[in-house]
Structures are given as C-alpha cells and as structure tokens.
Image (cartoon, rainbow, N blue to C red):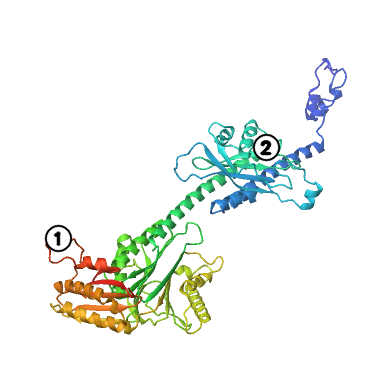
Amino acid sequence: MTEHPTSHEGRQPLVARSQERTRPRAEAAGPAAVPSGPPPKPKPQPQTHSVQAQAQDIAGTARREGDRLRFVGAATRRIARGIDLDEIVLGLCRATVPTFSDAILVYLRDPLPVGDERPVSPFVLRLRRSDRLRLNADDAEQGRVPAMPLLDPGTDLAPASELCEVRSGGALSEVLRGVRPVFGDSAAARAALPELLGDGRSVPGGHRAILAPLRGRRRVIGAAVFLRRPDRPAFEPNDLLVAAQLATHTALGIDKAVLYGREAYIADELQRTMLPDSLPQPTGVKLASRYLPAAETARVGGDWYDAIPLPGSRVALVVGDVMGHSMKSAAIMGQLRTTAQTLAGLDLPPQEVLHHLDEQAQRLGADRMATCLYAVYDPVAHRITIANAGHPPPILLHLGGRAEVLRVPPGAPIGVGGVDFEAVELDAPAGATLLLYTDGLVESRLRDVWTGIEQLRERLAATAQLTGPDHSPPLEALCDDVLDMLGPGDRDDDIALLAARFDGIAPSDVAYWFLEPEDAAPSRARRLARRALARWGLEELSDSVELLVSEVVTNAVRYAERPVTLRLLRTDVLRCEVGDDSPQLPRQRRARDTDEGGRGLFLVNRLARRWGATRLSTGKVVWFELPARP
C-alpha cells in the first residue's frame, strides 16, 4: 500500500493544494505555510491619512490650475475690451494688480512702430504706466506690510528714469529677444532689470519678480515687470506661462490699436483736408461751421459742408453725409464735394446739382450712397431755394425766437439712381438763421432722428429767446450752444454743422439795368453808374467805377447777341456785375505796343480790389469789387 507523504518534505494532497489556492494570498504566505525559520516581517500597510493627503494635494493642484485658467481667461477678456493703447495697458494693469502681482511696470517703445516700418537700433522704451496695490495709511504706519524696493508704502512706484535705451547686444536686449518671461532672480534678468529700471533700483529677491517681453506680430514692442511683496507667496514656474499669455494678448492688442489708430488718423486727416479751411464771406450773409469726428476711434465718416459764392452775390450752402465710416467714405466725400463745387460754378439749379451728384455717385460704385442738402441763398431777393436728397431737414430760426423745421421734400439719397429731385423756394427774411446739419447731431443710440430734430428746434428757440425779440444770437455762440446739447455717450457719428445768418441786401442798395448790345452801351453804362454813386454818396469812386464799367461793358457788347445786364450793389464794398450771353470767359493778356485793345482787364486787375468771371448756363458774368470808401 502506498502512503502519501503528509509532511513538509513531500507533496501535499490535491485537496490541500486546492484549499490553499482558495485562501487569500496573505494567509498563504503566513507562518503555517513556511516550513521553518523565523516568520517574515509583515509589509507596511498604507495609512488612510496618507491617501487623503495625496488626494488633497492633487485636488489643490487642480484647483490652482483651474484658478489660473479662469484668471487668464478673465484677464485676456479685459485686455481685449480695450480699443486704444491706453485702455489696453490699463486693462493689463487692472487685471493683474492685486490678483496676480502687487505691482506692475509697463514699458513700450517710443515711438511705437506701425505696420511694416523697419526696426531701428538702438530703440527707446518709455514707462507707459505703473500700478501698485494701494495700502491703507494705518497699515503703512504700523509696518504691517514688509517694505521692499519699488513697493515701499510711502514711496511712488517709479523707476529712476521713464526712458530706457535698449542697445543691441545688451542684457536687456537679449531678454527681450528671447520673448519668454523670466524670473527676476535669473542671471539674465539680474543683468537686464537694472538697465531697464535705472541704477540704484532693485527688485525683490527670489521668485517675486517676472520680466515679460511684449512681442507683437513682427517685433518686440515693450516689456512688463510683475512684482510681489515678500510676505506673499513667490511666483511659481506655471506663473511664467500666465505672464506669457498676458504679455502676448497685450502686445497683439497694442499692435491692433496702433494700426487702428493710424488708420483713424489718416482717415480723419483726409477728411479734414477735404473740408474748407475757412468759409467765404459773401455779401449779405454771415457763416459759421463746426465739425466733430465720431466719439469712437477710427469711426471716421463722410460728413462734409461747404459754402460756395455764386454770381449775383448769391451763395450755395451744402451739407452732406456719405454712408459708412472708413477711409473709403472720406475719399468718396472728397470726390462728391469737388463735384458739387464744379456744378455750383455752372450755376445750375439745386435739383440739377443733386441729379448730377447722383450720377457721379453711381459712377463711383453701386454701393456709393450719400445724403445731401443743397441750398442757394439770394440776398437781393431775400429768398432761398432748397433741394434735398434724403438728408435731415434744415431748421430756420426767425428773428424773435421762433424756430421751424422747413418742409422740404426729402427725396432719395444720392446714388440710388433713377429718381427726380424737387426744389422749393422759401422766404429768407433778414435776421433769420438757417441751420444745416448731419444726422450725427440729432440721432444716436439714445434717441431717434425725429426726436433729435425736435430737441434741436426747441434748443434753438430757447437760445434765441435769451437775446430778445429784436436781436439774433451771435452765430458762433449759437453753434457752440447747439453742440452743447449733446450729452455724454450721445455722439455715435461724426457731425457737420453749417449756420447761415441772412442779412440780405436792401432794395435801396441795388441798381439794375439792361443795356442793348450797341456801340452806345458803354457811355450809357457810365452815366447810369455815376447817378447811382451820387445817390449813395460815393462820388469819390466815380472815376474808377466809370473807367472799369466802360471796359467791361465794351467787352460784353462785342460778343453779346442779347441785352447786357449791369448791376451795382452797395454793402461793405461796391460790387459791379456785367452779364452777357456769351459763354467765353475773358482772359487777361499782355497787349503789344501796337495793339489798340487788350488792356481792359489789365486796368480792372490793377484798380479793383477783387475781380472774376463765372460761366452760367445762359452765358457769363464778369464782376469786380471796390472798397465802399476809398
């Protein structure tokens, strides 16, 4: 009979082995399973509090990383809200102090490069802004906050100099060229910061300062220095990534703001150069104007105004607004203004001027639309003729304080095409003031255009009543008062304003005759002029006026087929106008010694204070002016 071994020297029974496999591993390794020798020491078991500590560390790290991400997101959004340079830099400072740092210094290149400008070396950094955590006076006096360089409670946060010259190959230049932020105690920063801040200035020791280059799209445009107090935890390596994100968003925002500002400046200058430097001083009317660009940067529009002297002492008053806000709008405005001046020189009726402007706008492009109001004032007839192309209606302020919105057919905007414009003729009494304006004066996010027009009418009436029923308010002061009605945030568009005070010319100061185109016309013109001067008490001008009238009438009779007109007007000057049906304008030329003629315009040019000639649809008018008192 075979015996199965049961001791530790032989194999265990199958059942025993099966039971062993079913026991826990720890039990199998226990003392009963060991044949001899001392029992092994049990393995150390992990304690519950160690696992909790590790979990807390992991959770704390995740929480800090989440806080960093949320901070970076909020800070970059705040920086991105800035439109101009100062707003972007302010956004960086307010976003980082005191959340990320206790103080910050922001340096920018001076001047800032624009676009593809080639970099220069050496370049200059200027301290654009510094910000710090404000401390209570009690805290500073009691010394609760440890003092440190650049952050002493009683001192300003300011380096030794606001300017720093960055030389190629220097320590600061190398750090800026490296692009990545560095701790203040790194070898590179220890050499670069004294160069940036100036001699005698230091920064906190340890990881309590970060120097971050500000790099735009093409080049480094500045640097930011983040500082922490000694009683605050030092910066961590991950804070370098935060500083890099802040620096990148700030630099790109500054790049955008600089380009945006340059475009706005160019467009604004373009628009201003296309507006009249000064207004003319036509007879019988006083003029004043104002122009205000849009409140927002780079919101340049196509608003314009103009006053154009016309034959017969008349004047054309123009105000317009090209739709859109861009350099293109300003350029189109310049073309339309030039076209309007050319059409006015042809002495076309207002509705015809708008018709030709409409054709010109269509030639410029399908989307080139504008509104325009064109008016012609006649000081002799005391009448004004107005045509409107989709523009806000003018307001007439009467002597005595009554203000009315003139009923002018609005018409379609210029550029629509295929529409007719209608002109209306209205009384323009002496002492009244006509106000032409663009929609930026009466329309904004806070009010619609018709509410704004009514408010403007009421404002004009209230201002006029302050001066009494027999006096008109001063024109310049009236324009300023109109602009004062705009409150904060009430200006979304640029504004053009043109005011005309009608003085008119009294019938007693006008003399008008028709002369047949015959040889006797010059002598008759001399007699009529002499009588008018005697009636006005201007006999001392008789010799000069008779000579000049004779020369101009002689030239008109030579080419005219219909009666020649002669008109004298007495205002602050004596103006003489001679009209005929020949479109050919006279030209001054040098007469030879043997020539019998050709000296008339030479005499006019020498004796008259001013003279000129204007082509009309029915011919031309030659005029000259002499001082009313020699």
Q: Quadrant of residue 187?
A: top right
* Whether residue 55 is situated above or below residue 354 in the rendered picture: above
Residue with the mark numbered 2: 200
Task: Please give the label number shown on residue 592.
Answer: 1
Q: Amino acid at mark 2?
A: Gly
Q: CA distance from mark 2 to mark 1?
A: 84 Å
> Going 87% across and 21% down the picture, which residue do you hit?
39
Quadrant (top left/top right/bottom left/bottom right) for the C terminus: bottom left
Q: Nearer the viewer, residue 384 or 606?
A: 606
> Going 56% across and 53% down the picture, which residue do you hit?
82
**Do we see residue 617 in this rendering?**
no
Q: Amino acid at mark 1?
A: Arg
User: Mark 2, residues whose alpha carbon is within 10 Å: few (<14), some, or many (≥20)?
Assistant: few
Element on which disc 1 rests = loop
Q: x, y percentage for residue 413?
A: 36, 69
> Going 56% across and 44% down the picture, which residue do you hit?
108
Q: x, y percentage for residue 146?
A: 77, 43
Drawn side of residue 138 relative to residue 471, left or right: right
Q: Quadrant of residue 487?
A: bottom right
